[in-house]
Amino acid sequence: MNSKLILNPEREKSLKRLHPWVFSKAVERIVNPPSNGGDINIYSNDGTFLARGSYSPNSQIRARIWTFDQNEKINTEFFISKIKKAAQRRQLLLEENSLSAFRMVDAESDELPGLIIDKYNEFLVLQIQSAGCEYHLNDITDALKKLYPECSIYERSDAAVRSKEGLELRKRVISGIEPPDEIEITENGGIKLLVDIKEGHKTGYYLDQRDNRRILGRFCRNKNVLNCFSYTGGFCLYALKGRAASVTNVDVSQPALDIAKKNIVINHLDPGRVRFIREDVFSFLRKEKKNGKQYDVIVLDPPKFAESRSQLDKACRGYKDINMIAASLLSPGGYLLTFSCSGHMTPDLFQKVVADAFLDAGRHGSIVQYLHQAEDHPVALPYPEALYLKGLVVRAD
Ligand code: SAH
């Protein structure tokens, strides 16, 4: 291989600090460009080898790093060793937290840029988000077949980010059997959940909220809980386990609410204490406010409001709006669990938005807990961008 990327001398620092991306502005020149996603060696301006990565001519992220070791080849063996390492990193979580579904490979944070592998029982669900992983897809699937011969592999490469890498959207069985419409997983030692791998959001479920769902339970005893953006009712199950008096779930997705109803039943929880409302959360909250309703505990777990930095201002207005109405609906001494999964929203900025929301609602509140994504979604130290999910538990006076 003699494809070479030579860095602009002013822009070498990030790679020397082991950050896994090379932006287009950092490229001085390319010699023998490979095809989309192909391997390329990256050199400093003085000709020193720095890393081997994948080339993405269509993306602002022009190269993603596979390895900083000049002797390492990018082949099936490479993926076997990286996937093994990622699985080992989760050993403690699996031992302690009896669960049957978790994120096994989390892309850049597991040194495999653009590769997501979620394991749901015997199904490995793959999401390819970079041209480099697309180029090495056979190596990746061969590695998985060797490491997990008992598992079926399903591909959910239907995330919109693929278009930035010049890739088409795709869903299919790669090997083994087709996943049934619903499979039952367990998390946190006993809560059962039905997951639709083929049609559900992301790879089927929001694994990243596992710890925060458990945390909700302790605030719920005898309380009236409002679960906004409920999806398949994950937070609702923990509220009921925590002996909530009632839980109101609001989501626009009927298929998600249908699964949520079944999740109550399979956990032998009381459906009489649960309401499911298919409605836009913004309009639902306004209506509740107008009607003078109050709740003791409110969960706000909206979808990503900012897909890019340019959408951040608009996203802040959206977060402030729902948090302000939620603050005004809280009963005295009530708790708000509020989240943002927009990577562009920093924890500081999110806290400020929530503070402004309480101020405008005329409520005083205190943060009693800072929350973030679960440990199978780690943040590699050279790659702080991996922190995307943050949450606050705010107690209202
Ligand atoms: N809390 C969930 C995950 C929520 S994901 C869990 O723990 O599993 C965000 C959810 O918001 C999705 O289910 C989506 O259908 C829903 N949604 C998106 N926009 C919405 C809106 N404006 N009103 C109501 N629901 C919305």
Image (cartoon, helix red, strand yellow):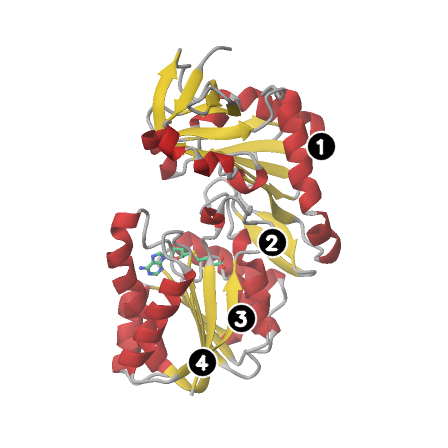
Q: Are marks 3 and 1 in contact (CB under 8 Å)?
A: no
At which x and y percent is residue 133?
A: 50, 27
Q: Secondary structure at mark 4?
A: strand
Residue type pointed to by label 4: Ser
Q: Residues within 10 Å of mark 1 (few under 14, many from 20)?
A: few
Q: Which mark is residue 366?
A: 4
Residue drawn at x 50%, y 35% as measured from the top left? 16
Q: CA distance from mark 2 to mark 4?
A: 26 Å
* Comes first in the chain, label 2 or label 1: 1
Of circles 3 and 1, the one toward us is 1
Residue 79 visible to the viewer: yes
Amino acid, disc 1: Glu
> Looking at the image, is mark 3 or mark 4 earlier in the sequence?
3
The residue lying at 32 percent from left, 55 percent from top is 305
Q: Amino acid at mark 3?
A: Pro
Residue density around tag 3, few if under 14, some if 14–19, many if 20 or more, within 10 Å: some
The CA distance from mark 2 to mark 1 is: 25 Å
